Amino acid sequence: MTATDLQTIGMTDPFGRAITYLRVSVTDRCDLRCVYCMSEDMTFLPKADLLTLEELDRLCSVFIAKGVRKLRLTGGEPLVRRNMISLLRSLSRHLVSGKLDELTLTTNGSLLSKFAGELADCGVRRINVSLDTLDAARFRSITRWGDLNKVLEGIRAAQAAGLRVKINAVALKNVNEEEIPSLIEWAHGEGMDITLIEVMPLGDIGEGRIDQYVPLSLIRARLEQQFSLTDLAERTGGPARYVRVRETGGKLGFITPLTHNFCEACNRVRITCTGTIHTCLGQEDAADLRRPLRASPDNAQLEAAIDRAIGTKPKGHDFVIDRRHNRPSVGRHMSVTGG
Ligand code: SAM
Ligand code: SF4
């Protein structure tokens, strides 16, 4: 048995899946209001409910000691959390010690020009930037008030700082469907991989999902009329399936929670900014880690609570979007759980 096997024994779920990937939402707040993610008048959590940066560090470090090898900070928008860089800097000690393989984040890119250099200094090597369109007016309407130029500048700054950028784009019916081929050509032309995501029924957004949802099977069939796509064997333990686009030479991912179930190899759990663990993105399961975290400076209670939560990780989700199921499957917004 290898050292890694020994480490992950405590983090194996009832279906034999080793939990090696932790995603942490460091804030539920955001400087944008994407129409598929949030309602316009979101009520955010009181700041007093949030874990402090020191508590987030301790929580992540316990997970790392229990076998997590990849840590992604997300939100809400992670870069709007004050002193985020100090948290990253502190967590980077686990990269230096070799206990962590990757420290990364998912961002909307709007603050990247300010932070790209510091991210690189903290040992971040790759980031995901969410961008659904290259049309400034459409970007403004999807995000309700965002400025596309800031995101494009942020991406350039990240690349200049040596970060590898992957673009995530949500496919939105009648909104950016037609633009997807050019978005792929742009991303690949700029040396970035791109992953397309199906809209998931998470949280009340003040309108139905049926108007937003377009199956990626349909998008893929359309792309195949224009591009030659070759399936890649690559798996990350996550929902994405990848293809190579011959015409551009770049890699394209599909995240299809609705048209294909992706749970059998799931290696991840998520923590909210208030210290709630969700072991499945698509189920209402939840356990509080904040109370055991605060109960004692010793980690024993916290570790026991983590083990109990992992021991109840569901087999998978059952998202449905159709005319009869046009309500959220899960009440939490993606910005709370951490996308
Ligand atoms: N604010 C950051 C960003 O936008 O990248 C990080 C958090 S955001 C919740 C993470 C990802 O979730 C983004 O790529 C976003 O497009 C995606 N997302 C949000 N709500 C979603 C939904 N209902 N269905 C599918 N993807 C969603
Ligand atoms: Fe903010 Fe990201 Fe949600 Fe858009 S997808 S509202 S950028 S958290």
Image: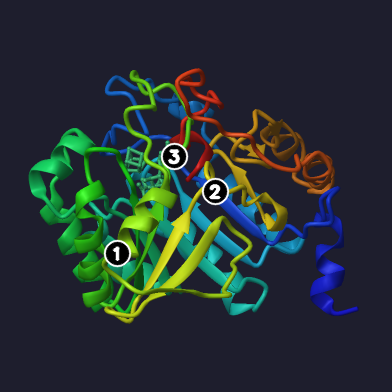
Q: Is residue 96 left or right of residue 305?
A: left
Alpha-carbon span between mark 1 and mark 3: 41 Å
Which residue is tagged 2?
24
Residue 32, compared with residue 95, is above or below; it is above
The residue lying furthest to the front in this view is: 225
Q: Amino acid at mark 2?
A: Val
Q: Is residue 54 above or below residue 241?
A: above
Mark nearer the N terminus (1 vs 3): 3
Q: Is residue 321 left or right of residue 19?
A: left
Q: CA distance from mark 2 to mark 1?
A: 39 Å
Gap in angstroms between the C-alphas marked 3 and 2: 9 Å
Residue 128: tell me if it is visible: yes
Q: Is residue 113 visible?
A: no
Q: Position of residue 236 (x, y in %)?
A: 59, 66
In the rendered view of the protein, which quadrant contains the N terminus?
A: bottom right
The quadrant in which residue 33 appears is top left
Residue at the disc numbered 3: 27
- What element does badge 3 sit on? loop
Q: Which mark is residue 225?
A: 1
